[in-house]
Image (cartoon, rainbow, N blue to C red):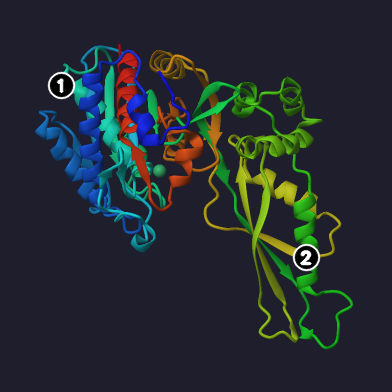
Amino acid sequence: MTIVACASAEQRGSFVDIAGIDPAVVAEVERETSELLSALIRIDTSNPPGDETRVAEFMAAWFAERGVTGGQIVGEPEDRRSFVLRLESGKPGPSLLLLAHEDVVPANAPDWQVPPFSGLIKDGYVWGRGAVDIKNLVAAHAVAAARIAQAGGPAAGTLVYACTADEEEGSVGGARWLVNNRPDLIKTDYVINEGGGHFLERAGRRVYILESGEKGTAQFRLIIKGEAGHASVPLRSGNAVVAAARVIDALASHELPLVIDGSSEELVQSLVDSPALRERLRDPRTARAALHDLARRDVLLADMIEPLYGFAFSPTIITSNSVAVNVFPTRVELSVDCRMIAGHDEQEVLTEVRTALDGVEADWDLEWVGPVTRGNFSPYPTPLSEAIRDTLERFVPEAQLANSHSVGFTDSNWFRAAYPDVIAYNFAPHLVETYEEVTPRYHNVDERILIRDLAFQSLFAEAVARKVLA
Ligand SMILES: [Zn+2]
């Protein structure tokens, strides 16, 4: 592989070979995946309302045109359906699900360089909403599954392909519905899903992030009560706005417990270049100061590692029920974003809020905002992570794999929650463009994917599936 450091991405794309793959096959997979992704982007599945059944029907027809039948369009309600295809070998062996979601977040066309639902192919990219989140994977997994089916199916076990509705808003008709209602169709030993697979280059090393877990969400609101009155007469105590200021200060300055576990270990080991700093980052007594030092050297890396060290309180909204500037409010509401690391729960959040506000002069109550979602994770390493590692070593010989957890939410969470034995990883690897280049395009304007990277995602999924189902 040759990386030409100062060339533009599209120039680099044509220089980067996928080790061990016939260039004619790469070209064919580039053509198939880019045509399919372009067509999928043209089906506007902005969520809300989603209306994803059109993608499910499109994929059923796409497979049928290739002689691959037996897929099912399933889910509720009628306009929020998913497509699931099972390829059984008839021989005993593990089962692997290639998963991605059909819906996208909305796009505001005037802000874009190209119409966001055009699926335009230019400058070596496929452009449009869903190009990296995550119709790319709907297309890449489909081409991988079709190539395996056309070659006679998996050698052993079962390969399952699924594109599912409603990931971005809440899974009413998508993965959550399927795991609860159709385990016969969707339950497998292994799942590969969106998220992860981006690479960073540090100290001459290329490190791919595999996400084996996800953080949970426990957003809350503190209701701070006060005394009513005319503001021309200052309150000796009981001003809810002043009390809220004390609460914010106490939350922001509270030192939350540090958790240094396997979700950050390999990131620190392979991406932090200084051995002394690595050591300090692994020691709970020095880790907090070490994170500050890391942020000064490499803010992106610090931003990746710090959320894995525990939860954080981030106050974001404050409102009062005062109707005029001369009236003291009886109620001030403070909204706080809080993400829990996998394996921890909202009871711990409550305990830490109480500890932080112990002795603070304020009369407060806490209520949760929206659903509390617990994070979860799959074991690592496993035969699936080893298959991913082996495939990576074959295609990108100098690359390393590092385990991590996602700070966001993906459908993998539903699978781990419903089926405790499932191994679900988020891994959609890029070959040419880095983490820094790709991740800002999520939910943003000018979303696009390099065609070489799209084909790589397909060839990679195919190779991992063949290895797991050998
Ligand atoms: Zn997504």
- Relative depth, front residue between 320 and 126: 126
On the image, the x and y values in percent for residue 406 come to: 53, 37
Task: Identify the mark nearer the N-term, 2 or 1.
Answer: 1
- Relative depth, front residue between 351 and 303: 303
Q: Residue at x 55, y 49 (%)?
A: 372
Q: Residue at x 38, y 41 (%)?
A: 132
On the image, the x and y values in percent for residue 375 come to: 55, 39
Is the C terminus in the top left, top right, bottom left or bottom right quadrant?
A: top left
From the viewer's perspective, is 254 left or right of 105?
A: right
The residue to which callout 1 is attached is: 150
Real-space Cα distance between discs 2 and 1? 65 Å
On the image, the x and y values in percent for residue 413 come to: 46, 38
Q: Amino acid at mark 1?
A: Gln
Question: Which element is circle 2 on?
Answer: helix
Q: Residue at x 84, y 64 (%)?
A: 361
Answer with the quarter of the image where residue 464 lies.
Answer: top left
Is the C-beta separation of discs 2 and 1 under 8 Å? no
